[in-house]
Image: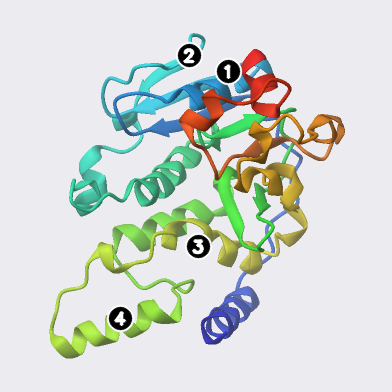
Amino acid sequence: MLKDLHIQILAWYARRRQSPLPEVAPTRLSRIGTLWIGDELPRFHRTCLRSWLRHGYEVDVFTYGSVEGIPEGCQIRDAGEIAPIDYFGPLTSPEVQRPPMISDLFRQKLLLRGQHVWVDTDYFMLRPFPDPRTILIGREPSGPVCSAVLWIRPESGISQKILQAYEHRTLAPWSHTRVFTRRLANLFKKQPWSILDYPMHHYGRHALDFAVEVHRLEGEVLPPKAFYAEVAYDDRLTRAGEPFQPLLDDPRIHGIHFFWKNEERIAQAEPGSFFDWAKAQ
């Protein structure tokens, strides 16, 4: 596709100018950070957070207000310590509804502190994370990287570049062709450019895919099964007939990020299903 060629050319040019990151020792991750925007943490998300605690991680849940249902053992933290709510500008407008983009930016601010690995609240942990060197990230079966589990070494400069692009509202080298086209159309129409004109994942997977290529980090990217098993895209794990023991036995599967999640269906999961087992844990 044209947009892919456009980004590949820019990545090739940036890679030629970018010195390889230095070899560093692996880092043992012991503290998880996450963000919840809303009044109540759903029941399934509570199950996921308890799975992190069960594997010995310290868990900080950042919020911008009171949230019901955060499991005992988690530390509730003020998200304003990391980024005041006005940092996100129009993204916080009730009419806009852009929590994913807020979350993408918040996790980069959090990772700069070097104290946490970021984990989405719909990730169920089966075994501890591997010790990363520069980045901890995995790919989805469809190909792109996904930041539901993310750690970036602060010294790499990756998080800083993503945040600078947001703060200066500049076109970034990972911007897809449709972003440039829209920006050009706005200039002709003499319309102001807004952060809302960027696609939802502009500061997430789009930026991270580019960073992986520029910094030659492909060897550190984990395969889909590490975090994004195909069983997480539909309701099959609510059924008793779907075998899940292979998920528990494979040491390369660290957990499951659930793209599909229907609270009512999960609550009625059949006895003997994965979700029935997970709730019992």
Neighbours of disc 3 within 10 Å: few (<14), some (14-19), many (20+): many
Q: Earlier in the sequence, mark 3 or mark 1?
A: 1
Q: Residue furthest top?
A: 72
Q: Is residue 281 left or right of residue 80?
A: right
In this rendering, the label closer to the viewer, 4 or 1? 1
Q: Label 4, secondary structure: give it.
A: helix
Above or below, 182 against 143 in this view is: below
Rounded to the nearest angstrom, the CA distance separating label 2 from label 4 is 44 Å
Q: Dot 1 surroundings within 10 Å: few (below 14), some, or many (20 or more)? A: many
Display colour scheme:
rainbow
Q: What numbered label is drawn on residue 182? A: 4
Would you name the residue on which mark 3 appears?
207
Q: Nearer the viewer, mark 2 or mark 3?
A: 2
Residue wearing tag 1: 50
Badge 3 amino acid: Ala
Mark 1 in CB contact with mark 2 (< 8 angstroms) = yes
The N terminus, quarter of image: bottom right
How far apart are labels 3 and 4 at the CA level? 18 Å
Disc with the residue nearer the chain's start (2 vs 4): 2
Tell us which disc is closer to us: 3 or 4: 4
